[in-house]
């Protein structure tokens, strides 16, 4: 797929990316500067544009969530309002996704027309003072800001702001009006919730990231300060107590004092992302340290092997430390995306490879898992253990169940599909950054990079079969005259990593590199080649013994991908999955298609009247056989099955 | 404590028990026939009467749930209505508990006055056609029966019927009016929901058991038939679909086709209990077989070691087969009680010891666990693993949290306290039954039995230090002239069980007996003694390997009691609980106070940045030490702590 850049000449510094801090250690390269051209993510970006975006617009229309804006403009609300209290936000996330997609494609007349049509409907619903929400404020509706715990008004506006930021960054100074809608609403928020205003916050964090970025893109510091007020107010019990406690919306402990992310996993990560934005803009080292500490503990004790977060179905929340059941792992798709948002902000501030490692883990095992191969059905929750085959969701039915064991086309709470779409469309913004001295490659995809570094143009072609192979080839197409540092991430699990420099003029330099960033500093010239190579052999991974739910089990990983066993690949049907053990001392064997062969044993089980008994452990003997396991992100593509990531060992 | 029997002369057949089928293999002995006089359960019955009942009435008044009836009578509803949609039912469960307590005490003037005062307030709220509910049917409220999924109207009436049954059985023909209130409401239910009426059911089963027993006590078959209609209608999708699926209220599969209990664990067991009543009254072998099968599978695959049921917090529901996480085990107190109700009905129909074994397990490990020693705070959920110390609930605060890790005085949803109270007050009805040939002892407590068997009076004195000791002594005080069979339950886990007959006239017969019922048939005379003895040595119990959440762990049981480790008994504080292992090959050692000493190891853990790693299992070495463990039902009595039932092994 060839694309041309429509706006924002290379290196203008418009920053065609979701996150562009005023200052940070690393500057994100925009989606105009990094283009994914082939491979794992190119395929998914193509499906996202061609199938997922039309699918989402269809459902927004069909469910009446777009129509709510028309009814607002016509003055016929609340009669006939459709959807949950946060349905406006799905329209905004769709707009954000479309804005990035137009930017990614370098323009698309049909998509542009659809974008403008939706913006016009949103615009017509905005009230004279900037207020915009289809659920509150009219006769027969709740009053504005009357239900901060559950009303999601500020949450919805946060997504509006992110959409406007995406549009302004991909079509600077454009005439569609979305930025004006956003700033009018943001001004109202500042008036109402400012230092002398309502001393509370929204039950669902999100407006913080939206305000911070809107402040960055418009240069209006007022928005950043409003984000800061929201960040600092929360945690002081400003919201009402609820059944699950104020930790649900992070109103239990002030953010500077919290030890780990807790409560609703999406809210917690959105808040942490917004707090990072505020801390970076303020140069607030104390707040940044608190956030780093929360990230560390959350990753060390509250994160699934897939990078997924959130153990509880009931409140979509983190569990306690090491409470990470595979059964009913919630691992909401949106929580994964939110965790990327938080991690990315720390990465560009700290240049610490651990953030990039985690982002990659989430990309391959949460973001890539949610959508079906055809891009029109989605996992909302991402369990690590499916005990009974799911029921297929009909193509034309809304799924009420976040715990659906099959991907579903749409949900009553449909946060995940448009969140996937906006992340996929803007994905190349997570691949690379620059600083004064060079460029850093954080994620591997066949792609082109075209930016300005050290006063000169730097054009790179990156080629890789990753994650199938652990070789990344970086060809310099054009480079500044001065010395430049190219840094390539070496993942934490990478073994035998070596970097080879093959200058165009001949000669080869090779050296071993450790996990972290492998830096190559030199005067590069067109035709120079860097090659990073490391092993992606399968790894058998064990859990910390404090994660009780998976004691005595192992998982198989290969490169960034977590693998899983599906009952479709086992003799004995769905129940067989409950009896398997990985045969000790055997290693997974690679197959040509990226799947792996493992040696399993089907242990005998006795169906007694009571599943607990005195005495020695039941014998572990049983027939051994070879089975195929596949990347977790591909599970449930072949129809209902049972599945597990963690495999018991003898 | 000495008591005198106020009503119902011994052996009149009034059946002073919650469940009195028209015919069944075994006839329950009433609370007038079996009196618990000392020991474990006598203590708890005493606390229930002296502390729990006043505590409940205080909270019903304070929360305004009793006041709702006054407002209904005054015509001032819906203004000022307090509590959830099912709050009426807590008043009815309280009335049931008080009725049993008055019966247990053989009369109590003060309690009688309180009982009548509450009945009068309820009576005043009943409408002319028999309808009775404070939440529906008035201007400004939902219409009657307009929200069968969530409205709980029939559920509330079911508890009213059970209260009326309790009263009529303990005060036959009494003049308080409760039975009339119940039958007027029941007649209305039959009119509205009969064969030609509304073809639906209540979202929460309960009216079925209420109607069946009301039919039994009044002889009105119409009520039993209405119960049957409700039982058969459910499962055909008569209720609306909801987020968690129709299985939540057992409306997914007709009861004759279901394989196991599923969905909301209280609803599932209440329904199964009511269905058993209907099947027994109809002599419906097919329905009984279906229920036995569901009981079998539920016990074999969906029940915690404690006998508790329900794995999910979100929907208070059963998980899939073998989905029994210790973390956040829900095991609602009411689900345990409901499981006793179902099991008891099968026991008196089938005389199968497995039902009695399960009832005992739930009595000692769920019913006895919920209330605090002083009877004024309660566990709603009964987790098997507490990772962080709970926060103490203030004595005067309503707890919104079912997952509270501390017992709480009251809840927004306060089903459990009055359910505990009615079960405790009527507990002696679960101890013994009779049939044409004799008496069966199902549970062991120091008690007196006084009934009529084989045409003659049979009076027994049972003495035991159970569960501390495995010796039960049964002294015959008076016996019929004919031969009688006395059957004593030998629990499934009992070892070396022997029964000794010591006739008054001298001589001793002794024989080994196997788990099941040990029958002794002979012509008994006053002074004869039977002694059942078996070992209650501590047992180390392992789980079925399909229960993933507790793989590699063991639990300690002793007699009917499950034990647990509390951090208060460990060196190293609350975190120590995450590091302990039971030292292989060591056996728990009995201490004088019923607690046990176990050999534990504190394994080293390394706090890395990521809790999953390639390579061999972490070493299991570490300091060993002796720790004390105690019965699970006593946990959290000494203040906040962490706790676990399942202990990892090396």
Image (cartoon, coloured by chain):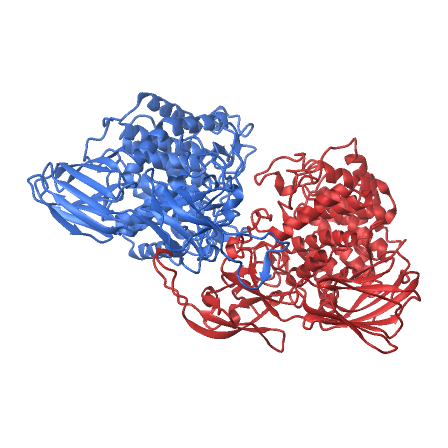
Chain colours: A blue, B red
- Residue B563 in the figure: left or right of residue B344: left
Q: Is residue A209 visible?
A: no
Q: Quadrant of residue B254?
A: top right
Position above or below: A395 against B381: above
Residue at x 49%, y 46% (from the top left corner) = A577
Q: Is A529 situated above or below A116?
A: below
Front residue of A480/A65: it is: A480
Residue A639 picture location, percent across and down? 48, 34
- Image location of residue B113, percent across then percent down: 83, 60
Instruction: State left or right for residue A488 relative to residue B6.
Output: left
- The residue depicted at 70 percent of the width and 70 percent of the height is B534
Q: Position of residue A402 (x, y in %)?
A: 50, 40
- Residue B304, percent from left and from top: 60, 56
> In the displayed structure, would residue A536 be above or below residue A1?
below
Above or below residue A395? Residue B48 is: below
Answer with left or right where residue A441 lies relative to residue B603.
Answer: left
Direction from residue B290 to residue A475 in the image, left or right:
left
**Residue at the image position 71 percent from the left and 48 percent from the top:** B292
Quadrant of image for the N terminus of chain B: bottom right
In this view, the residue farthest toward the front is A623
């Amino acid at each position: 797929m060839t694309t041309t850049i429509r706006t924002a000449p290379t290196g203008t510094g418009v920053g065609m990316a979701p996150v562009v801090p005023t200052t940070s250690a690393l500057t994100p390269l925009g989606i105009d500067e990094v283009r994914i051209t082939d491979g794992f993510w190119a395929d998914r970006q193509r499906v996202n544009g061609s199938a997922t975006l039309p699918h989402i617009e269809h459902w927004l229309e069909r469910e009446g969530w777009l129509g709510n804006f028309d009814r607002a403009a016509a003055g016929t609300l609340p009669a006939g309002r459709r959807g949950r209290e946060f349905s406006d936000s799905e329209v905004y996330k769709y707009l954000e996704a479309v804005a990035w997609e137009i930017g990614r494609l370098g323009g698309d007349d049909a998509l542009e027309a659809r974008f403008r049509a939706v913006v016009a409907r949103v615009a017509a619903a905005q009230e004279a003072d900037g207020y915009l929400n289809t659920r509150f404020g009219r006769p027969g509706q709740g009053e504005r800001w009357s239900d901060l715990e559950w009303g999601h008004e500020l949450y919805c506006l946060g997504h509006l702001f992110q959409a406007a930021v995406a549009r302004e960054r991909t079509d600077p100074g454009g005439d569609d009006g979305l930025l004006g809608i956003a700033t009018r609403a943001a001004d109202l928020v500042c008036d109402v919730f400012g230092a002398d205003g309502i001393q509370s916050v929204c039950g669902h964090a999100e407006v913080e990231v939206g305000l911070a970025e809107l402040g960055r893109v418009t240069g209006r510091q007022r928005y950043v300060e409003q984000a800061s007020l929201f960040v600092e107010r929360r945690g002081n019990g400003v919201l009402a107590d609820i059944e699950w406690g104020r930790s649900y919306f992070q109103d239990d402990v002030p953010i500077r004092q919290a030890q780990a992310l807790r409560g609703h996993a999406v809210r917690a990560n959105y808040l942490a992302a917004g707090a990072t934005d505020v801390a970076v803009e303020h140069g607030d080292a104390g707040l940044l340290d608190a956030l780093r500490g929360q990230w560390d503990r959350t990753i060390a004790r509250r994160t699934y092997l897939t990078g997924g977060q959130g153990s509880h179905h009931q409140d979509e929340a983190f569990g306690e430390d090491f409470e990470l059941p595979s059964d009913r792992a919630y691992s909401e798709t949106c929580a994964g995306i939110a965790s990327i948002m938080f991690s990315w902000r720390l990465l560009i501030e700290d240049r610490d490879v651990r953030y990039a490692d985690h982002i990659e883990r989430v990309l391959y095992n949460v973001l890539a898992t949610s959508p079906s191969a055809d891009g029109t059905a989605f996992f909302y929750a991402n369990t690590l253990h499916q005990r009974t085959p799911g029921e297929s969701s009909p193509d034309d039915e809304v799924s009420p169940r976040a715990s659906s064991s099959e991907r579903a086309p749409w949900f009553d709470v449909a946060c995940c599909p448009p969140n996937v779409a906006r992340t996929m469309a803007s994905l190349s913004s997570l691949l690379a950054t620059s600083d004064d001295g060079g460029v850093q490659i954080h994620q591997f995809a066949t792609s082109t990079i075209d930016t300005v570094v050290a006063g000169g143009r730097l054009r790179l072609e990156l080629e890789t079969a990753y994650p199938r192979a652990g070789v990344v080839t970086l060809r310099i197409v054009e480079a500044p005259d001065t010395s430049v540092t190219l840094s390539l991430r070496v993942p934490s699990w990478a073994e035998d990593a070596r970097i080879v420099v093959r200058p165009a003029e001949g000669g080869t330099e090779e050296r071993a590199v450790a996990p972290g960033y492998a830096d190559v500093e030199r005067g590069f010239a067109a035709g120079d080649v860097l090659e990073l190579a490391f092993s992606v052999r399968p790894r058998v991974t064990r859990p910390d013994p404090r994660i009780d739910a998976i004691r005595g089990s192992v998982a198989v990983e290969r490169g960034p991908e977590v693998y899983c066993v599906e009952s479709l690949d086992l003799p004995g049907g769905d129940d067989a999955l409950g009896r398997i053990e990985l045969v000790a001392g055997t290693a997974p064997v690679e197959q040509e298609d990226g799947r792996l062969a493992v040696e399993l044993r089907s242990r005998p089980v006795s169906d007694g009247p009571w599943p607990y008994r005195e005495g020695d452990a039941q014998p572990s003997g049983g027939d051994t056989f070879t089975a195929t396991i596949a990347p977790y992100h591909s599970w449930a593509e072949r129809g209902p099955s049972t599945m597990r990531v963690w495999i018991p060992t003898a």
